[in-house]
Structures are given as structure tokens and as C-alpha cells.
Image (cartoon, rainbow, N blue to C red):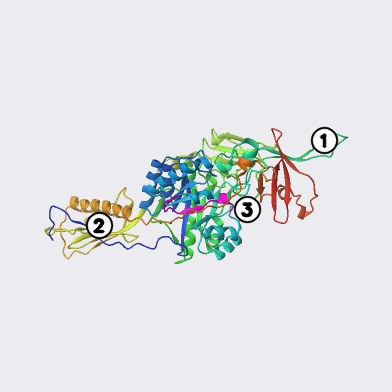
Amino acid sequence: MERNSNNSLYVSNHKLSPFGGVGGGFVELLAPAKTADIGIEAIRHGADAVYIGGPSFGARAAAGNSVEDIAKLVEFAHLYRARVYVTVNTIIYDEEVEKVEKLIWKLWEIHVDALIIQDMRILAMNLPPIPLHASTQMDNRTVEKVKYLSELGFPQVVLARELTVDKINEIHNACPEVELEVFVHGALCVGLSGRCNASEALFGRSANRGECAQVCRMKFDLVAPQPPKGEGMRRDGKVLKSGYLLSLHDNNQLANLEALMLAGATSFKIEGRLKDVDYVKNVTAAYSKALDAVIAKHPGKFARRASGHVNLKFEPNVWKSFNRGFVKNVNKPDANFDTPKSMGEPLNLRATNSPLGGRGALHNGDGLCYIDKKGELQGFRIGNVDKFVPTPGIKYFRNQDIEWDKILSKPSAERKIFVDIIINENEVKMIDEDGFEVSVSIDQDFELARSHQKENIERQLSKLGDTIFEARQVDIQLKKNYFIPSSLLSSWRRELTEALIAERTHFYPQIEQEHSPITIERERPFELTHDREIPAMICHHCIRRQLGICLKEGGKPQDLRLRLGNGKEFRLEFDCKNCLMKLYLV
């Protein structure tokens, strides 16, 4: 063999695996990113796509990112064929239209894959060919609504959190051309998405403008107003229940992923654009493993949208990340009346000097919490495990695991793309799992080796180290046992990996969606009208049902109100036919 001093690097025609498109069996795990760095960790831990807020107009005003930072995330994500969606999902005022349009063009120029939007006035703008996804803030609960959005050209619709599997399947069967995105984990809004005006009504902070004051996490008294005691005199009312009456337990669909996939959902969304990196690492890894397990049960039916495989350095456990406990039924969610804060993982402690939890041993420095007899949340740290004696009758939760935190504070996963390496008399070739192929020509004479070289050739060519690649196999097709210096094998390997990264970057299959400006009539937003005839909140959560006084179950009709500590009240109206509870500001 001969090889000249000017190595010839060749890139052959690539053959991409099928990518994207409804009906191809592709599913994506969609993870939140408060920052670009957290988004990168989400991809390392198994996300097929991430969603992130831009510098403005995102429904989480506290989670904004510069266009430059998002560009860094896009560049990393696209190496794995992972997508980046940016939230532009607030309502937009007239004076902001030009600014929003300029932002969208900037996001297109850095190759963002799609925008998640709420305000239909975006459709009237001069847009680049960037796909638009319909935010859950559009209140996407019915077949009719999803059909309408499909007719407007939305390829992906984020469904309301509270839909049943049967309802999702009904929407999929009626709108098979639409990719259906469903929330699978994290905080649940008690109000129907996009229909909650409570924060704006009470504090002038609109949830539809990214400034939610989280009224649902506040403490209320449930009051039954009493009739007037005398003319012109009205008694204050009887307090039936006090607590965090609107603070729902969190969502956890790990056990339902298979049913959701079979129902037609294609994108599985983790809530949490305000969550820290440890939360995103752990929850993303847990759902990635669960999705892979379902896919393995249905060979040929489903496939992950992004490339690569994840090597975890820990065992994910969603109970160890922020959670308020989990609902049993998202269509009829219940609240944690005791606290809106994270309880952590439930423990089954034995009253001994060396307590063990049902989920592992305690450690010095762990944080425990419990609800006391007055219904208040109490918490403490364990200074010395050997001296800690649990109080009988107390249900303990661990809301901080010191050893777990240490694991996640370090690099806890790597994501690799399989490559096959082939060496013959004329070239060294590298082919990745998506069909991209690059090669280096060999034009150099080599002496015959005195000892067998197969092991050294395999070892040197497969040393892919901290690159995004992992060698699946090295196929040596040399006719003779040549001595090839390790330095030359290493040089070929570096050239091939650099060329393959360049190929993956250059040929990223970005989807385009052409837009013709159209104007959609819309109602004036509550933020501009403050119309008290409009409910401040509409909920599937029903306080009557949770307290056992549901009218369908024998409860007595009575006027009920929710009262905040500042004296503000909501009047409750119950739509029992549709199992909805409505709140009106008094």
C-alpha cells in the first residue's frame, strides 16, 4: 500500500435513516432547559428534543436566554439529530409585533427547529420558514380544536395536561397528520392551560405574559358564607377547610408511557423550565430508559427521533427530584392540602438507632420532612444517623439525599453515536449509525510486521475517547499482516472523526414550513378587559370531590368561596355535568 504525504480525505454519499414525519413511528422525549447548559445535559441524558425560552416572550419570564446561548445549544443538539424548540408563547400586544418578528428571524438564522406559540397574531407576521407548534396555552382539549390548528398548518400540537388516554386516542384517530405532544412529568396547573386569569385578576401579573404569581400554590380557606343575621348584617361564614386547596400533586406518567404511545402521542414532554440541572438530568434519564423499554416491547413499531445511546453513571429515581407527590389521575387530579413544597421520597423508617428507608440507608446531612399534627410541614437535617430515632406514627420523607447530590454534581451520563470502522488496502472508512460515511485514502507502502497487528489496529482506531462516537466494530480487511505505526492509526482516526462531525453538521435535515400571512380574529385578552364575567380559573380539580361532598355523591348544595389571607375571595361554581370547577373573583 502507498500513501502520499498529503492525505486524501473523502466523504462519500450519505444514506440517512428516516427522520421525522408523522406516522413513521418516531417518538421524542422533550426535556426542559432553563439555560443552554441545562439543555445540553438533557440531551446527554437522553432527550430527543429540548424546549427553551428566548430573550423575551416566553411563558416563563424568569427563564430567558440570549440568542447566542441558544445557538450554542442548537449546535450541540444537532450533532445528535436532537431538536431545539424555543418558546414564544405569551400573548403579544400591538406595540410588540415588530420586536417579535425580528426575534423569530434571529432564531431561524441560528437553525432553531420550531417555535412554540400561543398568540395567533404571529400567523399574520412575515415569517421565515420555521415550523410553528401550538402551545398548550391555546387550550387544546378537543378534536375540533386540533383539527382547526391542523388546517392552519400546525404540524405539532401540545395537548392539555388533563386529557385521558382515550381522549388522546380520539384526537389522534381524527387528526393522524398532527404530531401530538403530551406532558408526562412535573408540575400540574390546576387551571385549564391558557384559561387561568387568577394571577392577573389578583396581582396584575399575567400567566399568559410569563409572570404567573402561582395563586394555586397559596393558602386558602374554604368558606361557606352564612345568611344575614339581621337586616343589613351578614355573617362572615363558616370555614370548612384551610390549606393549599388548589395546589395539585405533580404529574408522573412513567407507568402510562406505553398506553400513551399506543394512543398516538409522539412527543413526551417533561415540565420544568425553572428547574435546576440535577432535576433535568434525573427525570430525563428516567423517561429515556422507560421509553427505550417500551420500544423494545414493540419491535419495528416505534423508534427514537434522535441518534445515539446513553451511558448512565447512576440509576434514575424521580422520587429523589423535586415533587409534591404524584396524582393518580390527571383528568381528576387531587391537591396536596398540606404543602405546595417538595416532599421528596417517602421513607419507611424503623424506630431504631440505625434506621433504613424503604429506598435505602440514610446519610449524615440528609434532609427529612414530615407533616405535624397541626398539618404544618416541618423539616430538619440529620446530623448523626446513628443517634436519630424516628418518632412513631410520623410519615417521613427525604427531600435531600446528600450522596445522591454528590453523584449528580459530577458528569453523570455520556451520549454516544455508534460507528463502524473498516480498513482495507486502499482506505480507512468510518460509517455512523445514521449512514453518514467518510474515508481516508491510503497511498503508502508498509512493511510486514513481525508480530500480529490486529489487536493494536483495533485498539488504536477505536480509541474515540471524548468524541461523540463509540466504535461498534472495527473490520480489518487487510490482505497481509502489515506494520502500521500507532501514530498513523491515531492520525487517521482523528481525521475521520472530524470529517464525520462536519458531515453531520452540514447535512442536518432541518424541516422547513412555508408561511403565508393570515389574520385570525381573536377575543381581546383578559389582561386588557379584566371582565369579571370571565372565570379567573377553570379546573378539573374539584374541592367538593376531594373533601367527599361531591353533589353526585350525596353532598348538599351550598354557596362556597375560597378566601386568601388578604381577604380576597373567589366564588366557586360547579359544572357537574362536565366535572369542572370555576372560580370567579368576588
Locate residue 479, reporting x and y percent. 17, 65
Q: Amino acid at mark 3?
A: Lys
| 529 in relation to 285, above or below | above
Residue stretch in magenta: 126-139
Q: Is residue 143 left or right of residue 489?
A: right
Cβ atoms at labels 3 and 1 below 8 Å apart: no
Of pointers 2 and 1, the one earlier in the residue sequence: 1
Q: Is residue 523 magenta?
A: no
Say what amino acid the circle numbered 1 marks: Arg
For mark 1, what is the residue? 235
The image shows residue 17, relative to residue 541, as above or below, that is: below
Foreground: 174 or 448? Answer: 174
Neighbourhood count class around disc 3 (C-alpha, 10 Å): few under 14, some 14–19, many 20 upward: some
> Which x, y percent locates residue 291?
48, 57
The residue labelled by disc 2 is 458
Kindly report the distance in space between the C-alpha atoms of the residues bearing marks 2 and 1: 86 Å
> Does residue 432 appear left or right of residue 356 in this picture?
left
- Residue tagged 3: 328
- Front residue of this view, candidates 229 and 364: 229
Badge 2 or badge 3: first in the primary sequence = 3
Q: Are marks 2 and 1 in contact (CB under 8 Å)?
A: no
- Percent x, y of residue 577: 72, 56
In this view of the protein, can residue 119 be seen by the observer?
A: yes
